[in-house]
Every structure is written in C-alpha cells, then in structure tokens.
Image (spheres, rainbow, N blue to C red):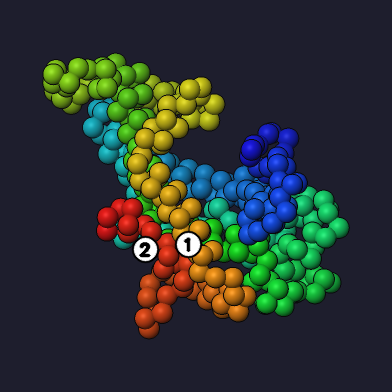
Amino acid sequence: MASHSPQDPTISLENHDDDNAEQTYGNDFQTNRKFLTFSWWLLHRGWREVMEKVETAVKAVFGPLNPREDIPLEKLSTLILEVRRRVEGATAEERRSHKWLPYLLPPQEQEEMVLRESGMLNSSPNTQSTSMPSPPSSPVATPPPSSFSANPLRRLLDETSDLIDSPPFTQILTLLLDTTFSHLTDHQIRTEAYKLPDPSSIPRIQEVPDLDSGLAKAKLANILAVMTRQAHAIGNGVPNRYAEAIEGVRELEAFAAVIYSSHFEFEALGDGREDERKGAQRRQETRGDKRLEAGVVDAATGVFENVWGRITGQ
C-alpha cells in the first residue's frame, strides 16, 4: 500500500514482497520503493511550478475585477475557462503539445539528486550501484549503457515518461479537468454562491430553469469564498466528491487498462537483452515523440497505441 504522511517527503511503500523470489521488472520491493521515491519531485518541485503558472493566470483574468462586482454564472464559467486556456493551452493543438512531464518527473541529470534528497542513497549500501547514473562531477563512475538500460528502475522511469508524454495522457487529463471544474461550477458554486438548485437534484421530467441561471448573479467575494472552501474539500473532503467525479470518467479506466495491457504485451515480446538495450536507447533518443519515423516505431510505444486503439475503438 502506498501512502504519504506530512513527515515523509515522498510517497512510501509497505514491504509485502520479501517472499518474492522472481524479483522481476517492477515486482521487487526495492525497485518499487525507489520508483515511488520520485514522487519527491512532484511534492517539492513540480507542484510549485504548476502553482506559479496557475497563480499568474488567475491574477491576469480575475485581477482587474472588483470583489464587490456582481458576476453572472455564465460569465464566471467564461473566466474560469480563460484561466484554463492560459494554463493548459488555448487550442486543442496547444493542449496536445503541452508537456506535463517536467512537473511530474525530474530530468535525468537530477535523478540522483532526488534519490539523495529523499534519503534513498543512504538507505542501502548497494543503492548507488543499482540506482541512477551519477552526473559527470560525481566521483562514482557512470554505469555503461548496457547495464544502465537493463536496470529495472531505469525501465520503469522510461516507460512512465513515455506514457506521460503520450497524446492519450493529455487527452485523459483534459477530461479529468473538465469533470472536476464542471463539478465546481455546475454544482458547488451554483448552489452555494448563486443559490440555484443542483441540476442533479432536479427530476428528469422537470426542465432545468435556464432563465434563472442566466439572470442569477453573485458577488465575486462570495464566489471566491466558496472556491476557498472547495479547495479544502478537494484535499481533505470525506467523502471526496471530486475524486468520485474522477472515478466516473470511463476513459480513465480505459487508460489504466492500456497501461497494464501494454506492459504485459511488452514483456511478452521477449527477454532478449540486446533488443531491450536498443529499445531503451531509442526511447531516450525519441522520448515523448510518438510519430512514425521512416516506418520504424518503438516496440513499447507500438504496443501501447495498439491497445489504446482496441479499447477506444479507434
């Protein structure tokens, strides 16, 4: 079970794999523990960069408004959408090309720093030889490419990076944000700030009074107060309505199935170390690039796209 406590700088993992004799890719406790250690980057660096980007967008959109100004619900939805455009991308192409990987995982030259800051390099005498390659300034020699590409942790990080940089990831992220922002505006703000009935509580045989929604107004100060309360509900709400809304996105479940299926099919391609080494080199050279080049595509990426196509029917 993975968990995170205020005292722990990373997401931790309980050891239930001591009896695992296979110690295969991604199945041994130490590899999984090191992999979850990279949550340190999101918890200490990535979230701050996202926060600064969102803060800049919010100030640009909401800054000129007077807190005492009456804001129609439709205008509020437009303002929130403008903030999202500034953060996620104004067009569909910008959203597809937006890179979220730097917020979630560190660049390779800082991977050892993450392990060191999280305490992993001091937790085991063999950690240095089985973790990330040392930077040029380190006195420890960098492992050769063959042993580096065969490292289970290296493979997990590379495969995760490929998934994050893939078009389906951005598509799913947009759907999740659409769902959560819809819950915020169409349910919480609508009922608490605008004093309108929750659309989900109105019987289907009864029409939703769109006229009332168009005429309803609320002061910006009251709207911001609701948003502040909802910010606490997002992080600490029990039950968490936003998490429940996310669980209702069917595409997320399909994406999870893609990840599991592509992993199993990738393992079924064979255990040839030479093919594995070449595949790892190609992933590092073309990380994040899912386009066909001269008719050659990375085997893992090809499997991933094939499974995604079967599940989505595309």
Q: Please provide percent x and percent y for residue 284.
A: 55, 72
- First reached walking from the N terminus: tag 2 or tag 1: 1
The 10 Å Cα crowd at callout 1, few under 14, some 14 to 19, many 20 or more, is: some
Is 167 rendered above or below residue 74? below
Label placed on residue 265: 1
Q: Please provide percent x and percent y for residue 314.
A: 27, 58
Is 50 rendered above or below residue 181? below
Drawn side of residue 197 relative to residue 102, left or right: left
Mark yes or no: residue 95 visible.
no
Q: Residue at x 51, y 65 (%)?
A: 268
Label placed on residue 207: none
Tell me the CA gap for discs 2 and 1: 10 Å
> Where is mark 2, residue-wise?
306
Q: Residue at x 37, y 81 (%)?
A: 295
Q: Please provide percent x and percent y for residue 82.
A: 32, 44
Element type where label 2 sits in the image: helix
Q: Please provide percent x and percent y for residue 239.
A: 48, 22
